[in-house]
Image (spheres, rainbow, N blue to C red):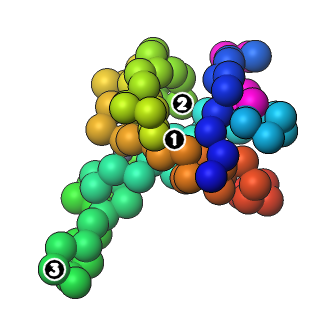
Amino acid sequence: MFVPTAIQQPTPQELQLTWSDDQTFTLTLQQLRDACPCANCKGETILGVYYPPVKLPMFTPGMYEIEAIEPVGNYAIQVRWRDGHHTGIYSWEQLRGLCEAPEAE
Ligand SMILES: [Zn+2]
């Protein structure tokens, strides 16, 4: 599995990740936020039953701006967004998947 060796913000709208295989990818913060894996954004499955997100995805000011990025153990980062949202934990596996996914639109 690949591990990021550097995470930088080259512009206010982008996050650049360098990986242990020396590949570098740039994600837009919108891609990152829209992929937020937390239960509020993506819903969750409990005992085989899928519960959709509790609220509609609506634009809020600051939702595509990063206030802070905090490491979670050695397997993930937690992103604190300027609109106050901070429950999304992005594992290396998910981040790498986002990096390799074709552009969303
Ligand atoms: Zn979320």
Q: Which residue is mark 3?
A: 47
Out of 24 and 103, give the one closest to the viewer.
24
- In the image, residue 58 lies at what x, y percent? 41, 46
Amino acid under label 3? Leu
Residue 61 in sight: no
**Residue at image coords 37%, 41%:** 88
Q: Is residue 17 magenta?
A: yes
Q: Which residue is mark 1?
A: 33
Cα–Cα span, label 3 and label 1:
27 Å
Q: Earlier in the sequence, mark 2 or mark 3?
A: 3
Which quadrant of the view contains residue 21? top right
Q: Which residue is mark 2?
A: 64
Q: Which mark is residue 48?
A: none
> Is residue 46 found left or right of 72 in the rendered image?
left
Q: Which residues are magenta?
A: 11-18
CB contact under 8 Å: marks 2 and 1: yes
Query: In the rendered image, which quarter contains the C terminus?
Result: bottom right
Q: Is residue 46 magenta?
A: no
Q: Main secondary structure of the magenta part?
A: strand
Cα–Cα span, label 2 and label 1:
6 Å
Out of 22 and 105, give the one closest to the viewer.
22
- In the image, residue 54 lies at what x, y percent? 22, 59
Q: Residues within 10 Å of mark 1 (few under 14, many from 20)?
A: some
Q: Residue furthest right?
A: 23
Out of 36 and 89, give the one closest to the viewer.
89
Circle 1 — which element?
helix
> Is residue 76 found left or right of 25 in the rendered image?
left
Asked if residue 6 is positioned above or below residue 98 in the image, the reply reads above
